[in-house]
Structures are given as structure tokens and as C-alpha cells.
Amino acid sequence: MANNGKKGIPSQEIKKEIEAAEIHPPTALEKKVFGLLSAEKNGRRKTVFTEFPYVVLRYFRPGFECFSAWGSVELKAFSNFVEVLGQQTWESVYRSGGKPGTKTGLGYTQYKIDEMKTGAEHLKAVSSLLSEDVGFFELRLSDRVRVHGFQAQSAFFLVLLDKDHRVFP
């Protein structure tokens, strides 16, 4: 059968990776650090809804806005945000969203990059490094202060700071 210049699925390499994963499963520490989901004692698979989020700065883009541009009020709001986020499950974070005027707490709001008023180039650069199914959202720190990023397992990957709510004024 001709492959017409297309590469086939590398089944042998995939099989090797599966076998390696079976031989060397993630340690308990790796599961905790990386927020990997595991089975509960009753055999049911955990869902991300019950996991507690934490902030990761791996894809943070200081070229849009940096912590150095923030005053003590914004920095205190960020510290409070990290604490509040870690005490909630992802389910409660999702529930904080809603229609404008009905959002509560963190005000989870999904959006498309093309809808942004400013900063889209930063998210597009990060998006190009990720899976196509990763969606971005904003979380509220205060009346004006927002952070933008995405979720992977338990982690909230913070990408942009937005102290004056410029991305969606």
C-alpha cells in the first residue's frame, strides 16, 4: 500500500512507550506534584472536578504585564487568589462563572483568543505550543484585576496578568 508521502502511526514506538509506562508508573510524589488523576479506593476514576487547583507559571508571558507593574493592592489580591484557588475544587471554580452580573467569586470566564481586545498575540504564542483542545479563560482577583490562562489536570497555568481588565474592558 502506498503511503502518498504521509507518515503512518508509529505503532512500535507507541507500544514501547506504553510498556515503559507500565514498568515505571508515576510515583505518588509525581502524581501529587503533577496533579495526575488516579483511581479511588473503590476503583472509580477520579475526575478533575474534585481536584484542588494550584498555579503554575510555566507559560507566563511577562511581556504583556509583569508583577513589577503591580502595586501592593494587586499583589495582595494575587496572594489571596492563590490561597482561595487552592481551597476550592475545579467544580467550584467552574460554577463561579455565569452571565455578566451573575458571576461569583473567581468569575470563571471562557473565551476565544480572537475575542480579546489586547494581548491576543501572547496567548496565540502559548497556544501554538499546546494541544488544539486547550481553551483559555480568565479568573477574577478583584473588581478590576484578572488573570488569564488555561487548565491542565489540577494545574491552572497562568499566562497573562491583567491588572486593569484591559483584555476585556
Image (cartoon, grey):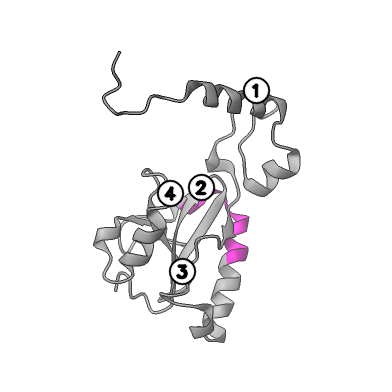
Q: Position of residue 85 (x, y in %)?
A: 57, 59
Asked which secondary structure carries label 3, the reply is: loop
The image quarter in which residue 44 lies = top right
Q: Would residue 44 be seen by someone viewing this image from the given angle?
A: no
CB atoms of marks 4 and 3 within 8 Å: no
Callout 3 environment at 10 Å: few (<14), some (14 to 19), or many (20+)? some
- What's the distance in space between the residues labelled 4 and 3, CA to CA? 15 Å
Q: Decide whether residue 99 is among the magenta residues.
A: no
Q: What x and y, as percent, mark residue 15?
A: 56, 22
Kindly indicate the quadrant of the structure image that contains residue 126: bottom left
- For disc 2, the marked residue is 152
Residue 68 lies, with reference to residue 135, above or below; the image says: below
Instruction: Please report whichever mark, 4 or 3, sits nearer to the chain's N-terminal start.
Output: 3
From this view, report whether residue 2 is shown above or below residue 17. above
Q: Looking at the picture, which amino acid does disc 1 mark? A: Gly
Which of the two residues, 83 or 30, is positioned nearer the viewer here? 30
Q: Residues within 10 Å of mark 4 (few under 14, many from 20)?
A: few
Name the residue tied to disc 1.
Answer: 43
Disc assigned to residue 61: 3
**Foreground mark, 3 or 1?**
3
Distance Cα–Cα, label 1 vs label 2: 23 Å
Secondary structure type for disc 4: loop
Position of residue 3 in the picture relative to residue 74 (left or right): left
CB contact under 8 Å: marks 2 and 4? no
